[in-house]
Image: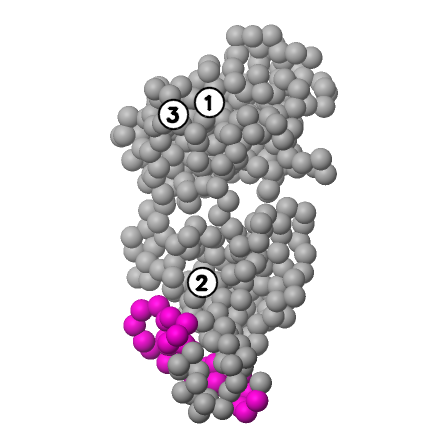
C-alpha cells in the first residue's frame, strides 16, 4: 500500500464508523477510506482498507471465514499471531493473523457487547452466547498472560435423523433396535460421552422417534436440538445484561416447562443446578424425560450427578435416591478413528444406598452384567 501505513488509516475509519448509527455499507466504508487517505490510495489499497475496517465492525471480523468453514466446531485465538481451529480431527493452526493485540481486544469487546455483556479491565472475562448461537468465551490481560484469548464454539444444529445415524454407522449392531424400544417404552435416559462425541445429535435423533402425539418441551442454552417431530416447544436461556440483571437459567426453564404440560421434558445439557429439578420432575410422573451429560465413562455418571446435585444443595443420599427412582437408561457415546458411535447402553440400578451404571449392551461385545435388567426394561431379549 502506498502513502501512510494501513493501521492508522483503518483506525481512523474504524473510529468514525463506530460513532455512526446503523451497520456500515461497503460503499460508505469505501468513501470514508478515500476521504481519510486524501484520495492517495489506488483501488486495490482501498479494497484492502475497506476489508480491514469492516472486519473489525461486522461479524467475527477476520475469524468470520473460519466460522463458516465446513465442519468447524471451534475457533481459538491465543493472541494476535496464534489462531487455531478444530473441525473434528483435533486442533490445527491456521494462517490468520491480527494486526496487533489491540485488534484482538477490540474484537473480543465488540462480540461481548453483541451478546449484551461487559468486557473490560473491571470484568476481564466473559462467557456468553452470540445472537447467531455461537458460544463466546474471552479473557483479557493481565488475567490472560499471553494476550487477549478468544474461544468461539460454533452452533451445530443436530439435523441428522435416526436413519441418517444408522446409515453412518453410529448405531452399530443391535443399538438401533434397542434404542427404538427404549423410546417406545418411554424410559427416562441420559445421553453421555466426552466432548465432541455427538451427544446432542443422538438425543435429537432419538426424540424424532417419539410418538407424534407427544408434546416435547426442550430446555437449552442454544437451539441445537432439531428433532423431526410435529410438536416441539423450545425454551432458551438468556444471559444477564450489562447491569447483571435479567438472566434466565436452565433451572428457570425446567421449572417453567413443568407448567406447560410436557409429555417429555428434555434438557439439552445437564451441567448445573437444573439437575435437581429434572430429577424431581422425572419422579413426579413425567416419563420419558431425557438430556445429555458430559462424562467420559458410564460408570462416572453417579459421581457427576452427585457433584451437580451437591452444588445445588442436594445431599449425596438424596441425589442417589432421586436418580435411582428417576433414571432407567444411559446411552453412552464414544469418538474413535472410525467415527462417533453408541458404545454402550447402561442400566441405572441401586447398589445399597447408592446407584451404579452397569452395562446392559456393549458394541464391542464385552461383559454385560445388566443384560437381564435391560431386557426387563425393554420387554425384549437383549442380544449377546
The rendered magenta stretch, by its main secondary structure, is classed as helix
Q: Nearer the viewer, residue 129 or 61?
A: 61
- Residue 209: which numbered mark, if any? 1
Q: CA distance from mark 3 to mark 2?
A: 36 Å
Picture quadrant of residue 122: bottom left
Q: Residue furthest left?
A: 259
The residue labelled by disc 2 is 59
Which residue, as the protein is rendered here, is positioned at the far front? 43
Image point 33% across, 77% down: which residue? 19
From what the image shows, is residue 93 above or below residue 10? above
Residue 110 lies in quadrant:
bottom left
| Residue 23, image x, y percentages | 35, 68
Earlier sequence position, callout 1 versus callout 3: 1
Boundaries of the magenta span? 2-29
Mark 3 or mark 2: which comes first in sequence? 2
Residue at 56% over, 29% down: 164
Query: Residue 56, position in %: x, y?
Result: 46, 71
Which dot, 3 or 2, sits closer to the camera? 2
**Quarter placement of the N terminus:** bottom right
Q: Is residue 78 left or right of residue 214?
A: right
Q: Is residue 150 above or below residue 213?
A: below
Q: Which mark is residue 264?
A: 3
Badge 3: how crowded within 10 Å, few (<14), some, or many (20+)?
Answer: many
Was residue 55 drawn as part of the magenta stretch in this picture? no
Q: Nearer the viewer, residue 41 or 242?
A: 41
Across and down, in percent, residue 88 comes to 64, 46
For the C terminus, give its image quadrant: top right
Q: Is residue 243 left or right of residue 47?
A: left
Amino acid at each position: 500500500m502506498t502513502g501512510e501505513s494501513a493501521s492508522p488509516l483503518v483506525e481512523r475509519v474504524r473510529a468514525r464508523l463506530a460513532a455512526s448509527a446503523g451497520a456500515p455499507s461497503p460503499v460508505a466504508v469505501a468513501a470514508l477510506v478515500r476521504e481519510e487517505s486524501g484520495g492517495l490510495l489506488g483501488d486495490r489499497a482501498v479494497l484492502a482498507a475497506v476489508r480491514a475496517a469492516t472486519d473489525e465492525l461486522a461479524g467475527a471480523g477476520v475469524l468470520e471465514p473460519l466460522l463458516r468453514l465446513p465442519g468447524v466446531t471451534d475457533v481459538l485465538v491465543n493472541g494476535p499471531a496464534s489462531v487455531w481451529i478444530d473441525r473434528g480431527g483435533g486442533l490445527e493452526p491456521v494462517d490468520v493473523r491480527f494486526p496487533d493485540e489491540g485488534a484482538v481486544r477490540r474484537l473480543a469487546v465488540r462480540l461481548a457487547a453483541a451478546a449484551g455483556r461487559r468486557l473490560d479491565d473491571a470484568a476481564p472475562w466473559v462467557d456468553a452466547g452470540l445472537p447467531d448461537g455461537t458460544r463466546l468465551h474471552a479473557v483479557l490481560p493481565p488475567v490472560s498472560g499471553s494476550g487477549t484469548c478468544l474461544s468461539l464454539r460454533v452452533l451445530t444444529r443436530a439435523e441428522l435423523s435416526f436413519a441418517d445415524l444408522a446409515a453412518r454407522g453410529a448405531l452399530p449392531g443391535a443399538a438401533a433396535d434397542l434404542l427404538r424400544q427404549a423410546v417406545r417404552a418411554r424410559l427416562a435416559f441420559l445421553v453421555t460421552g466426552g466432548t465432541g462425541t455427538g451427544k446432542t445429535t443422538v438425543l435429537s435423533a432419538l426424540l424424532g422417534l417419539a410418538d407424534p402425539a407427544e408434546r416435547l418441551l426442550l430446555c437449552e442454552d442454544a437451539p441445537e436440538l432439531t428433532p423431526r417431530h410435529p410438536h416441539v416447544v423450545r425454551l432458551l436461556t438468556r444471559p444477564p445484561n450489562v447491569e447483571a440483571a435479567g438472566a434466565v437459567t436452565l433451572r428457570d426453564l425446567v421449572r417453567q416447562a413443568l407448567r406447560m404440560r410436557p409429555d417429555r421434558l428434555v434438557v439439552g445439557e445437564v451441567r448445573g443446578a437444573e439437575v435437581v429439578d429434572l430429577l424431581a420432575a422425572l419422579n413426579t410422573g413425567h416419563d420419558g424425560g431425557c438430556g445429555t451429560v458430559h462424562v467420559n465413562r458410564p460408570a462416572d455418571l453417579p459421581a457427576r450427578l452427585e457433584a451437580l446435585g451437591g452444588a445445588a444443595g442436594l445431599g449425596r443420599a438424596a441425589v442417589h435416591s432421586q436418580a435411582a427412582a428417576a433414571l432407567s437408561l444411559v446411552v453412552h457415546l464414544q469418538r474413535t478413528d472410525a467415527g462417533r458411535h453408541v458404545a454402550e447402553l447402561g442400566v441405572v440400578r441401586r447398589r445399597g444406598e447408592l446407584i451404579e451404571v452397569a452395562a446392559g449392551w456393549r458394541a464391542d461385545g464385552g461383559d454385560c452384567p445388566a443384560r437381564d435388567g435391560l431386557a426387563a426394561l425393554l420387554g425384549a431379549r437383549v442380544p449377546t
